[in-house]
């Protein structure tokens, strides 16, 4: 069963490559994390998986309250390992 993607209008704001632009580490298995994201509705904490990172940022995969999947690059300080 395919997971629906979060529509762009509802997705978390993602950092651009110029903000996280270091070599990217990609783990063999995602790391479970809690992360703060910013959406059009404001800031909120999500349960997520870190699927890649740099010294300054992490790329997370998360599900919204409707069970839709989203991805975003967020600052490393917004992520905490669970």
Image (spheres, rainbow, N blue to C red):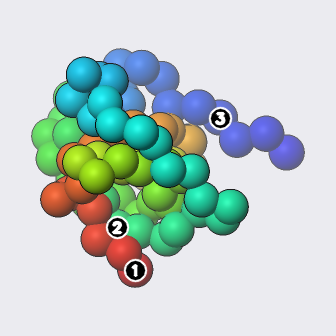
Give the residue furthest to the front: 23
Instruction: Point out which mark residue 34 bears.
Output: 2
Depth check, front residue: 78 or 44 = 78
Q: Which residue has dot 1 on it?
A: 82
Please say if the residues under marks 1 and 2 sit with CB atoms less than 8 Å apart. Answer: yes
Give the percent coordinates (x, y) of residue 33: 41, 68
Q: Is residue 32 left or right of residue 53?
A: right
Q: Is residue 20 left or right of residue 81?
A: left
Q: Is residue 55 left or right of residue 68?
A: left
Q: Is residue 48 above or below residue 22?
A: below
Please say if the residues under marks 1 and 3 sit with CB atoms less than 8 Å apart. Answer: no
Give the percent coordinates (x, y) of residue 70: 49, 38
Q: Is residue 75 left or right of residue 12?
A: left
Circle 3 Cα neighbour tier, 10 Å, few/some/many (<14 / 14–19 / ≥20): few
Q: Is residue 4 visible?
A: yes
Quadrant the N terminus occupies: top right
Q: Secondary structure at mark 1?
A: loop
Q: Is residue 39 above or below residue 77?
A: above
Residue 10, by quadrant, is top left
Q: Secondary structure at mark 3?
A: loop
- Marks 1 and 3, the one that precedes in the sequence: 3
Instruction: Point out which mark residue 4 bears.
Output: 3
């Amino acid at each position: 069963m395919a997971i629906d993607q979060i529509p762009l209008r509802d997705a978390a704001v993602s950092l651009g490559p110029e903000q996280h632009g270091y070599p990217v580490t990609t783990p063999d298995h995602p790391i479970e994390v809690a992360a703060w994201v910013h959406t059009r509705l404001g800031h909120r904490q999500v349960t997520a998986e870190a699927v890649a990172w740099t010294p300054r940022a992490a790329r997370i995969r998360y599900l919204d309250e409707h069970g839709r999947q989203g991805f975003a690059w967020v600052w490393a300080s917004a992520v905490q390992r669970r």
